Image (cartoon, rainbow, N blue to C red):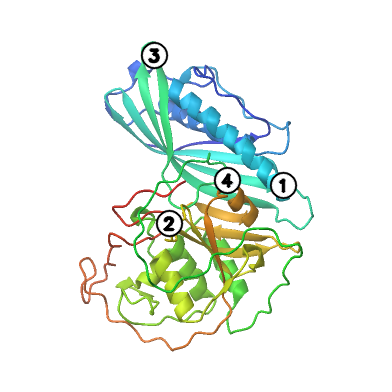
Amino acid sequence: MRSTTLRSAVGTVLTVATAAVLLPAVPAAAAPRTGGVDQATAETFSRTADALLTQRTAALLDTRSGRIAPLPRKQVRLSAGLARSENAGVATLRARKQRLAALGEAYTAADTKVTVDGTRLTGRRATVEVTESTTLTYKKIRGDEPGTTGFKARHELDFTAVPGGTWELTGIRSKDDGPGAINAPALRAAAVADDGNTMPSAPSASTSRPLRAAPRKQLTGGYDYAAMAAYTEKYWRNYNPEYRKFNADGGDCTNFLSQALKAGGWKPEGGATSDYRKWWYDAGGQSDSWLGVNEWSWYALNSKRVTSLSNVYQMDIGDVMQMDFDGDGSKDHSMMTTYRSSYGVPYLTYHSTNTYRKSVASIIASYPDAVYYAYRTSRPPRRPYNRPTPPSRPGGGRGSLAPPPPRPGDVICGTRGMMGSMMPL
């Protein structure tokens, strides 16, 4: 099926009613019962996603004017339950905008592109996968903010054919792990049992704004922090083909972080895959500390390659932030600082959800109850690299080029193991 792409520039808040008679629809009865859909139906689904996602983004904008993509007039309606959910979600986004304003941040414009990646038809039900690419323009409040922030987010939508030849949208959900995009409505975190972790523990970092911005650190210690940031900003959206990606295995955030640290001078340390004191990647696999959120923290602290910071606003280019979404003591997400304003605000870039220069203020505003950890990457490595023996567990046998899969219980990025529950979006 040919991809369908729509682009919208958002300037005002749209409204979603229980029966939204706003969007185009091919008669649902004409759709095939199995397989794909025709181009007109794909465009209907794309425009439906575009309307919901741009409405969410509009709730964050610090403006009441601006160009809005014209809405077609053929019918696609929202189910009553989804309409209530979206209205409640937009309300949480307006509250987030107020929290951002209190932290000195706002957005003046947004540009969104929606691409239909695939559809599945089963009887009169359609499941549609789309990718949202959104760029937000920072308001120049202090004058030293970066120009824009952006993200790519994957969503899955559920449609049902209803009498009268229209479609009813009954659900929309994120397909990404890690923290949700800035326009993702707030959701309740899932409770996760304590796993009894006794490994090296990083102290949590304060998220209160310091009265005075911390001075920029001296770039010493043998690392190239600019190279770390440049790598991260080069591959945040288009992945480096020289590395495996782990989006389908719990998220790619720490894998991506490790790549950037290596680009900036971190030298691999060979050893057993499960030894958190080792950190490496090769054609046959990778250490758990290269890929796992908690394992990376244990390795980085034990190797003295990082020191913990007491406040997230102390981070500078090349420094790392991790998050524990639900406060259960197990870290869930990793990201790198790639820009810092002269006013002292760090901006993070990361995978899962793929995001460019998102301010620490907007992350805190989206996840006020999360636990945060900040690390300064300022110490030289202890030992030279020794090439590891390829791992021998299933999926990565001795001499095999196939990487071993993550194991149940591993926290890769945003999920608790391959069989665990999803972290909040």
Secondary element type, mark 4: loop
Q: How crowded is mark 3: few (under 14 residues within 10 Å), some or many (20 or more)?
A: some
Residue matched to label 1: 102
**Picture quarter with the N terminus:** top left
Give the side of residue 384 with respect to residue 284, left or right.
right
The CA distance from mark 2 to mark 1 is 28 Å
Task: Tell whether label 1 touches label 4 (CB within 8 Å).
Answer: no
Task: Tell whether label 3 touches label 4 (CB within 8 Å).
Answer: no
Q: Which mark is residue 165?
A: 3
Give the side of residue 218 with respect to residue 377, left or right.
right
Residue type indicated by callout 1: Ala
Report x, y in % for residue 296.
Answer: 43, 70
Question: Which residue is depicted at the point 43% across and 56% down?
Answer: 328
Q: Which of marks 3 and 1 is nearer the N terminus?
A: 1
The CA distance from mark 4 to mark 2 is 23 Å
| Marks 2, 1: nearer the viewer | 2
Q: Residues within 10 Å of mark 2 (few under 14, many from 20)?
A: some
| Marks 4, 2: nearer the viewer | 2
Q: In this view, does 388 lie above or below 31?
A: below
Question: Which residue is depicted at the point 67% across and 46% down?
Answer: 100
Report x, y in % for residue 187.
Answer: 48, 41
Question: Which residue is depicted at the point 49% across and 24% down?
Answer: 83
The CA distance from mark 3 to mark 1 is 47 Å
Residue matched to label 4: 182
The CA distance from mark 4 to mark 3 is 35 Å
Residue matched to label 2: 328
Residue type indicated by callout 3: Gly
Question: Which residue is depicted at the point 52% across and 53% down?
Answer: 370
